[in-house]
Structure formats: structure tokens, C-alpha cells
Image (tube, rainbow, N blue to C red):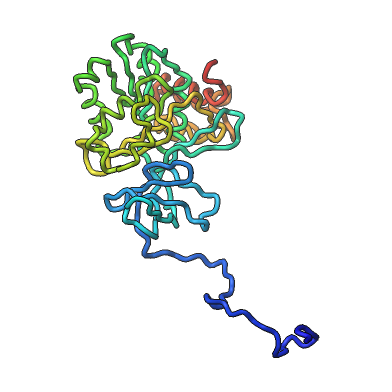
Amino acid sequence: MRRYGKNPDEDDIRVRPSRRGSRPRTHTRPKHEDAAEGMVLTVDRGRITCLVEGRTVTAMKARELGRKAAVVGDRVALVGDLSGQKDTLARIVRIEERASVLRRTADDDDPYERVVVANADRLAIVTALADPEPRPRMIDRCLVAAYDGGLEPVLVLTKSDLASPDSLLDTYRALGVPYVVTSREELEDGSAVERVRELLDGHVTAFVGHSGVGKTTLVNALVPEEQRRVTGHVNAVTGRGRHTTVSALALPLADAAPGSWVIDTPGVRSFGLHHVDPSRVIHAFPDLEPGTEECPRGCSHDEPECALDQWVADGHADPARLNSLRRLLATRERREGD
């Protein structure tokens, strides 16, 4: 019996019905007005842990978000199972607009930028005064990344019992960067922790520094074990019993105003600035920025025709501030070990 012929409407053609019915394909994405709001606490191999109404919820990114990745600090919208119970999985369907981003590249020749933290308003640059020796070029690069990303930098100098902080502080005094100096003894008796806490109270602060400077030790002192319960099983991501952080992790700052968070990030060996537009760094110098109005187009602010020299000579700003600006701008062209 002939089942297929010239007439496509033959009665002997069998059509297998679909249980779901026939739906036309569409590129219209659901709006998810009923999605719950959450904050990304950590990201580990495609699984994203979020805080939703006081509960930690494990989620994955919805396919409709495409290549856009969620990072620690992101404000997101979630649907699905939001109970936070074991083996449940929610779905992130929207990543809200970011107020700030801390970005870096692997080195200055790498065009691929990595967003480390979103929506932090402060960057705590942790540096040891000895063992290991301070790296001013690394500090400069972190300062540039902070100014470029819209974060206020803070210097946290550790191990002052091994070396004096005076010379390092003199280098950055003209920038007016807030700072706190700590020693091992002060960390043990808690006095240093309280000074750091006062500096961070009411802020979302990302901590950055290379390995061995005591960054994670300080974060652990700021967020005691009982406060970590809000993040539930997330603590395993930090590697309990180890001295390094393997993934960025947001934790609530203890004994502080609501909305105070510390974000511990993995130790970095380099901080590439390929992504930074040097013209944005001037925004962190409000006393110098008006003086750039007379600069030639495309001025690097470190050339003979730069109008900032006359601006400073006329007494509108401290010469040390201009020197600091030029040092930071030159940082992008130098390796950290130079």
C-alpha cells in the first residue's frame, strides 16, 4: 500500500500526536516578574551559591543569559526551588546592572578581562610590610583597578612588628587613601580587627593581595565561625584547614551595620591592566581633573604639553598629587616586578 504520494493530504498518512501539543518557536524570553532577588556569594564550577531571604540557595545560570557570567557580589533574580535544601537547584534568570566592577587581566598583554567582584564599594589592598616584602607596583595596579572600577581603595598593612610602615605610607600619603596598620600581636588580641572593622562598617569590601600577606587570616578574624552559618555549606569552598582561598567568597561582616560584607578573593600573583582606559583614572583626582580642560586631545597627562603642570604651578593642587597620578598612569606600562 502506497503511503506517500503526490497528495500530502492522503488519509493513510499517520501523524503521531505530541503530548505537549504544537508550539511555534519564539525568541521572546520570559520576563520572570515573580523571580526572587538574591546576592551571589560564591561561584564554583558552574554552581552559583546565592543568598535569598536569609537562605543559601544553589543555582545555575539560565541558558537565556548567554555568555554573561554571574560573579560574587552580583544582584540576581532566581526562579525554581528556592528552599535551599540539599540537592535542590534554582535558576538565575537575570543579572541586575552592576554599580561597580573589579576587573583584571592575567597580564598587560592579555585582552581577556576577568570580572573578579561586582557591586563592592571598597577595595581593601592587603600588603605585608615584611615576609613577604611589600610590592609597591602591585599596590599601584590595584589602585588603578579600583579607581577604574568605581571602588574606594583602602590600604591594610600587616606585620608592622617586622618592619616600619612609614616609608610605604609616605609613598601614598598624597593620594589620601584611608589605611590601617596591624601587627601579629594586635591581630591576636583583637585590637587590629576592631580598627579594620570600623573602616569597613557599612560597606561591601573586596579584599585583594598576593599570597602570604595575611589576607585570609584577617578575613577569618572579621567573620568568626558563628557568623559564617548564614552561608551554610559554602564554607567548604574556602578549603577549611588550608591557608589559601581557592574561590572568591562573600561573608557578612560581624558586629556591623546591615549590608556590610567582606569578599575574600584568591591570592593573585599579577594584576594585569590591559582593560583599563587611562583617561578614566583622572576621575579619582577631583583636584586635578578641572586642569585637564586645557590639555591637548588624547593627552597622556605625562607629556610637555600637558596643562596639569600649569594647573599645579598656579597653586590649584599639590605637586605630590600630580606625581602620584603620573606614577599610577605609568603603572599600566610597567610590569609588577620592574
Depicted 290 relative to depicted 217: above or below: below
**Residue 208 at what x, y percent from top left?**
40, 28
Task: Find the residue positioned furthest to the front.
Answer: 1
Depicted 278 relative to depicted 231: above or below: above
Q: Residue at x 39, y 19 (%)?
A: 212
Seen from the viewer's position, the closer of residues 323 and 53 is 53
Q: Residue at x 54, y 32 (%)?
A: 105
| Quarter of the rendering occupied by the C terminus | top right
Q: Residue at x 26, y 33 (%)?
A: 223
**Residue 154 at what x, y percent from top left?**
34, 28
Going by the image, does 25 lie left or right of 146? Answer: right
**Which picture quadrant has residue 4?**
bottom right
Determine if residue 123 is in view: no
Going by the image, does 165 lie left or right of 144? Answer: left
| Quarter of the rendering occupied by the N terminus | bottom right
Depicted 51 relative to depicted 22: above or below: above
